[in-house]
């Protein structure tokens, strides 16, 4: 048996792991939005987020390490997007450079790819 293939980027919403479903896929849109808001606010510890997620669910619903990976990826993505935004705001003598435009387009495509893969998993295609 081989190892799972992990497609990861700081620009993705979450790591895409083939052969294993990410716990976030099992959350409703409202729950995922609330989790992301709590992560972005940064006021809660990992253990507090874990307790909130497990409330009323099977304790095995999400592991601490899985949540930690999700939080890490979300924060890395936010930092990468912030860096891109700062770079885009810098003046360029001839307007925005082609390289910057391509980087922003690639980031957008990666986010779209992650969302499409998540939806295909929800539909049971992957």
Image (tube, helix red, strand yellow):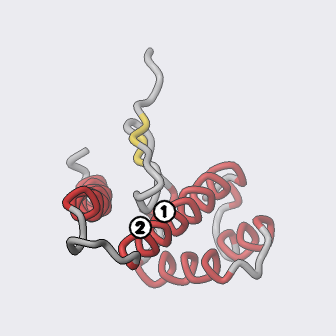
Residue neighbourhood size for the residue with mark 2, other residues' Cα within 10 Å, grouped as few (<14), some (14–19), many (≥20): some
Residue neighbourhood size for the residue with mark 1, other residues' Cα within 10 Å, grouped as few (<14), some (14–19), many (≥20): some
Front residue (pair 17, 13) = 13
Q: Position of residue 85 (x, y in %)?
A: 41, 74
Alpha-carbon span between mark 2 and mark 1: 6 Å
Residue plotted at (68% across, 52% down): 63
Q: Position of residue 96 (x, y in %)?
A: 24, 71
Residue placed furthest toward the top:
1
Provide the secondary structure element on which disc 2 rests.
helix
Q: Quadrant of the C terminus?
A: top left
Q: Quadrant of the N terminus?
A: top left
Give the vertical position of 120 relative to 31 (above or below): above
Q: Position of residue 20 (x, y in %)?
A: 44, 41
Provide the secondary structure element on which disc 1 rests.
helix
Residue plotted at (59% across, 65% down): 75
Give the vertical position of 113 relative to 81 (above or below): above
Residue plotted at (62% across, 57% down): 72
Give the vertical position of 90 relative to 59 (above or below): below
Task: Indicate the quadrant where residue 53 lies.
Answer: bottom right
Q: Which residue is mark 1?
A: 80
Left or right of 121? Residue 68 is right
Q: Which residue is mark 2?
A: 84
Dot 2 and dot 1 residues touching (CB under 8 Å): yes
Front residue (pair 6, 122) = 6
């Amino acid at each position: 048996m081989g190892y799972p293939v992990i497609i990861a980027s700081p620009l993705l919403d979450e790591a895409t792991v083939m052969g294993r479903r990410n716990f976030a896929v099992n959350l409703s849109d409202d729950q995922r939005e609330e989790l992301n808001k709590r992560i972005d606010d940064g006021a809660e510890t990992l253990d507090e987020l874990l307790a909130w997620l497990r409330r009323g669910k099977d304790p095995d619903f999400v592991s601490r390490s899985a949540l930690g990976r999700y939080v890490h990826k979300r924060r890395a993505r936010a930092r990468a997007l912030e860096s891109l935004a700062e770079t885009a705001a810098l003046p360029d003598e001839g307007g925005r450079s082609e390289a910057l435009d391509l980087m922003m387009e690639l980031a957008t495509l990666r986010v779209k790819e992650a969302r499409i893969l998540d939806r295909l998993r929800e539909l049971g295609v992957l």
